[in-house]
Image (cartoon, coloured by chain):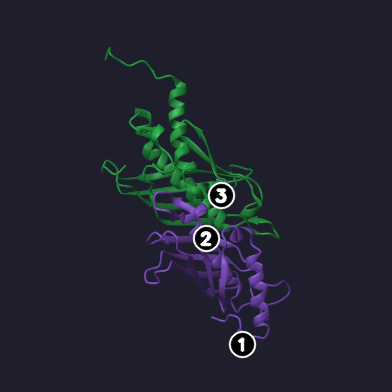
């Protein structure tokens, strides 16, 4: 949604997105998996991950391991929480369930889109889906709960 | 009854079990990427994920990445389930362990769903996990995994997953 030219109503939307982007790219494990932030804003994040032979879980088919897809979903879910309008300063996964609907096609990039659809004082709820080049049926879907840590001293109003 | 075979030499039994386990782990690139290995005592497996900087998800704490933890637990579950699935054939000698390799792996169970419960943040230390197959039918299996770091009693994550079992005896290698 709100990407480069951010149309987020709050002031500092651009700055917030820039900081969050740098933060995500500074996550060692996400970096090791080659993840790329595509979009981030208003509680929605899109992150993609390239096909790599090192990430294969089924040697005879060349299909990426479910664990790598989980990592993509988890990172994307966390990013969606971080960019939710209710200023969240940090988050951690409480639980994450992944449904693997079909194997991702070998050789194709996987893209996940996560939506943080509800935030309470201390919990953020997230839904996510991931696709390969075929944007019809997702390869996986996820639901998760994340912790909400707000900026110290504030009521999260900024 | 009187024609009982003499017991097989222990080193041959162990060798066969270790070869089968090695094929299940060394043949899978992602297991190597994560640096995960397995300790075996009889049929009991413990997955070990030695600490590596690339597994970090939050550099300021620092804490392991939730995705690295999920990957570790899923690998532990699949290897446990696969090893159990092959156990009888390994023991009887029906499985030709010498022929197993990255290109000739038995078909592995496929994950249907996997739910991870993050109990506390993963410290920048080695992690251990053990999986328990709660049900294993012809088509579906349910597996629970527990992971800990310094103290076996203080789990830092647990997970439950459902798996689709590969078609066996069907002819496909």
Residue B125, can we see it?
yes
**For this view, does B121 lie left or right of residue B134?**
right
- Give the CA separation, mark 2 to mark 1: 31 Å
Q: Chain of mark 2?
A: A
**For this view, does A108 lie left or right of residue A42?**
left
Q: Which chain is green?
A: B
Residue behind mark 3: B34
**Helix, strand or loop for disc 2:** strand
- Give the CA separation, mark 3 to mark 1: 42 Å
Residue behind mark 2: A95
Q: Chain of mark 3?
A: B
Q: Position of residue B34 (x, y in %)?
A: 56, 49
Which circle, 3 or 1, is nearer the viewer? 3
Q: Check if mark 3 and mark 2 are on a common chain.
A: no
Q: Position of residue B25 (x, y in %)?
A: 48, 42
- Image point (55%, 70%), residue name: A124
Q: Which chain is purple?
A: A
- Give the CA separation, mark 3 to mark 2: 21 Å
Q: Position of residue A37 (x, y in %)?
A: 57, 70
- Image point (61%, 81%), residue name: A4
Residue behind mark 1: A9
The number of discs equals 3
**Helix, strand or loop for disc 3:** helix
To which quarter of the image does residue B120 belong?
bottom right
Residue that protrudes farthest toward the right in the picture: A153
């Amino acid at each position: 949604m709100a990407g480069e030219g951010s149309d987020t109503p709050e002031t500092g939307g651009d700055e917030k997105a820039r900081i969050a982007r740098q933060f995500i790219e500074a996550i060692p494990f996400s970096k090791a998996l080659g993840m790329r932030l595509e979009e981030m804003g208003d509680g929605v994040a899109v992150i993609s991950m390239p096909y790599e032979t090192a990430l294969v879980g089924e040697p005879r088919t060349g299909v990426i391991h479910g664990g790598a897809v989980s990592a993509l979903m988890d990172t994307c879910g966390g990013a969606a929480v971080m960019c939710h309008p209710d200023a969240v300063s940090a988050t951690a996964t409480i639980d994450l369930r992944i449904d693997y609907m079909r194997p991702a096609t070998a050789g194709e990039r996987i893209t996940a889109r996560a939506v943080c659809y509800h935030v309470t004082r201390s919990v953020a709820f997230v839904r996510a889906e991931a696709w390969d080049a075929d944007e019809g049926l997702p390869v996986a879907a996820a639901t998760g709960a994340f912790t909400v840590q707000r900026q110290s001293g504030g009521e999260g109003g900024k | 009854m009187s024609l009982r075979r003499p017991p097989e030499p222990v080193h041959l039994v162990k060798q066969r079990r270790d070869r089968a386990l090695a094929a299940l782990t060394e043949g899978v690139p992602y297991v190597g990427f994560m640096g995960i290995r397995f300790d075996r005592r009889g049929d009991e497996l413990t997955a070990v994920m030695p600490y590596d900087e690339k597994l970090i998800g939050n550099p300021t704490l620092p804490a392991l990445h939730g995705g690295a933890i999920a990957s570790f637990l899923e690998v532990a579950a699949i290897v446990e389930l696969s090893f159990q699935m092959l156990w009888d054939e390994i023991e009887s000698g029906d499985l030709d362990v010498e022929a197993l390799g990255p290109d000739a792996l038995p078909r592995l169970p496929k994950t249907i769903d996997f739910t991870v419960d993050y109990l506390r943040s993963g410290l920048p230390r080695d992690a251990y996990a053990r999986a328990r197959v709660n049900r294993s039918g012809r088509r579906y299996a349910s597996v629970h995994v527990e992971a800990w770091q310094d103290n076996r009693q203080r789990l830092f994550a647990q997970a439950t997953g459902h798996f689709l079992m590969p078609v066996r005896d069907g002819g496909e290698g």
